[in-house]
Structures are given as C-alpha cells and as structure tokens.
Amino acid sequence: MIDLPPRYDGTLHPEVWIQDLRFFCTLMGIHEQATILNIAILRIDHNIPIPKDINSFKSLINVLKDHVTHSVFRAVSLEKLNKLKCERSIDMSEFIAKFNSLCSNANITNREEKKDYLLRSMPDNIVRDVLRNRIEKLNSFDKVIETFKEVMLDHRSQVRYGSKIALKHVVTGRFLSSKDIRYDTGSKQYMVYCSNWQSDKRTDFWIVIPPHKQYCKPGNPVAFNSIIELKHQQTSRNLHSHGGIESPITKQQEVTCYSGTDNNNNWQLQRHSTTNKYDNSGYWMIGDTISLRHVNTKKLLSSHDFLFDDGNQEVTCHSYGHEENNKWCIEVLE
C-alpha cells in the first residue's frame, strides 16, 4: 500500500504543511516543483476552494491563509498560547519548542509581544518579575530565551513553601530522619536522628511549611532569616525541640518529632557562618550550607558521630554559635 502525503484541512499552519508535503515528495523521488504543486492542491480539503490560476507555493499559501479555517486555527493557537504554563518540572526545551510553535501559529511575530506572552507563562509572580527585569532591554529573542533558561534553572533550585526536601548533615553525610519510635527517656516523643548516607523517601523527606499560626502562599520561595517549620512527610509530625529536656546520649537539648502545633516547632533559617555576622540575603537554594536555630531556645540543630545502639546518629539542639556540627544542606528537592 502506497503512503499518501499529508492532507490539509486547516488544522496545520499552511507553511508547515507545505514543508511536510515537499519532504514527503522528496522521499518518494518526486522533485519537479510543478508536479509537487499539483499534488499539494489535490491534497487540500474539498471545502477549501482553490483558484485555478495558482502557479506557485507562495500564492497557494496565501490562499490557505486567507481562508476562514486558518482564522480559526490562529484563534485556537492564541487560546493555547494564553493557557501555556511553564511549570517547575517541565522540560524547558519542549516548552520553548511549543511556545515558538504556538507564536508562529497565532501569527505572533513582534518581539515585545512574544516577551509578554512568555512572561504570562511563568509559574508565579516572583519568577515573572525576575524575568521581566532581566529581559526588558534585550533586543534579541534568542537572548530572551537564554535568559529564560537561566531564570528557570534558578527557580528550580529554590526551596519553596511546600517543597519536599532531604536535609543532610554536612560533617557526617547522613540524612535527617524520623520514624515511629519513641525515646525511652525525656519527653518520650518520637525520635529524630541521622541515619542513611543515601536519602530514603520513607524516612528522610521533610516538607517546608510556614511557622505556627502564620500563612505563606504555597510555592513562594523561602527567604533567609525566615521562621519555618519542617513537617516529616511520612508521619506528618513536626521537627520540634524544647528547653529543659536532655537527649539520651550527650545530654544536650532533645530534638523530637511532635504531632502537636506550638511555637517549639519554629526554626530560624540562616546561612551557616563562622562569625557572628550572617549573610541572610536572598533565598534558600540547593547547595546552600545552612543552620537551623530553634526560635524559643536560640540553640542550633546539631548532630555528631555519637550513635544509638541501632547505629543511628543522635540529633540535638546544641550551642548558640558556629560549630561545624551545626551545618546542614539540601541534597534532594522536590
């Protein structure tokens, strides 16, 4: 059975359709332009009238563009362009290919107009404002796309309210964990410890949420110096500490997972510093070395190579300063 060339019914851009048809004819060994033009006319839907004096591909394309079906096609493409969103997890190359295709199909050719549609597709106002400031004076749309790529890569590296993270203790390389085991002493709340050297979604994932009795819009980036809570994904309990209760091994301030809601779940996000000066500008990103300061007691989340009998590593709140054991970083972000 002989394959037929693509048919035109108004659901493709005329120029794209002609290109596909010419490619088909080349594959079939048909190179005479007049013959290809006649094949093209024969493959057009009978509801689209074609004048008999058509003698070039340019004139044929103009006739197809003037027909009402192409007007509908442009309107549908514009509607799709208005709905197009560049979500955080989207493949950027696929997004840009679709964006450019829809702009072409909707006959959007003006550079500033294309910038406007690209800005509309951004995932939130924060990313939109960053991109707007950086592309405002660019005179090349290729440069706009390059800048878009850079902004989106930064966006994907930002920790946001609602992000699921695996938090690694820098010195020992183990991940902050919890599960349904209570301390035998102290508060007898659920244990927090460092366990695996490779993150495990069952025990090591925490959700970044706003502090007790405060609201932050999900998806907003987390600025340094913010007060946050960390909710253990598997158990829905919060990272918690309190003064006056000692940890089992080192007798430092106990850290637990707590199902209740109170101010002892609040932690201040800081860049780790070796001095009393903290650079807390900007937003929390993958790769940042951080400290988490317990708001009520001012002590820092810490771990060390003191082990429980099961081989897990003790986590406590310890010291007010800048020890190496207070350093944490994000290894996984979802």
Image: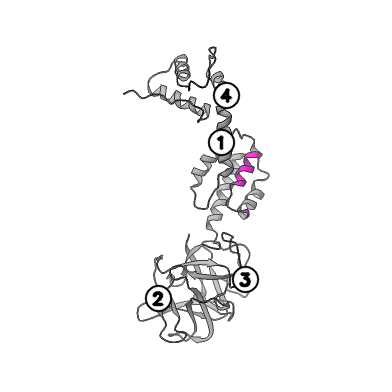
Label pair 3/1, CB-CB below 8 angstroms: no
Front label number (2 vs 3): 2
Q: Residue at x 53, y 63 (%)?
A: 162
Q: Residue at x 54, y 76 (%)?
A: 261
> Which residue is disc 4 drawn over?
67
Q: Earlier in the sequence, mark 2 or mark 3?
A: 2
> Which residue is disc 1 drawn over?
76
Say which quarter of the image contains residue 300.
Answer: bottom right
Q: Residue at x 52, y 70 (%)?
A: 230
Q: Which mark is residue 278?
A: 3
| Closer to us: 212 or 331 | 212
Percent x, y for residue 270?
A: 58, 70
Furthest toward the top, the residue is 53
Range of residues picked out in magenta: 113-125
Instruction: Please name the amino acid that badge 3 sits on.
Output: Tyr
Indicate the secondary structure of the residue bearing disc 3: loop
Quadrant position of the N terminus in the picture: top left
Q: Residue at x 38, y 24 (%)?
A: 4
Label pair 1/4, CB-CB below 8 angstroms: no
| Closer to us: 82 or 325 | 82
> Which residue is disc 2 drawn over?
180
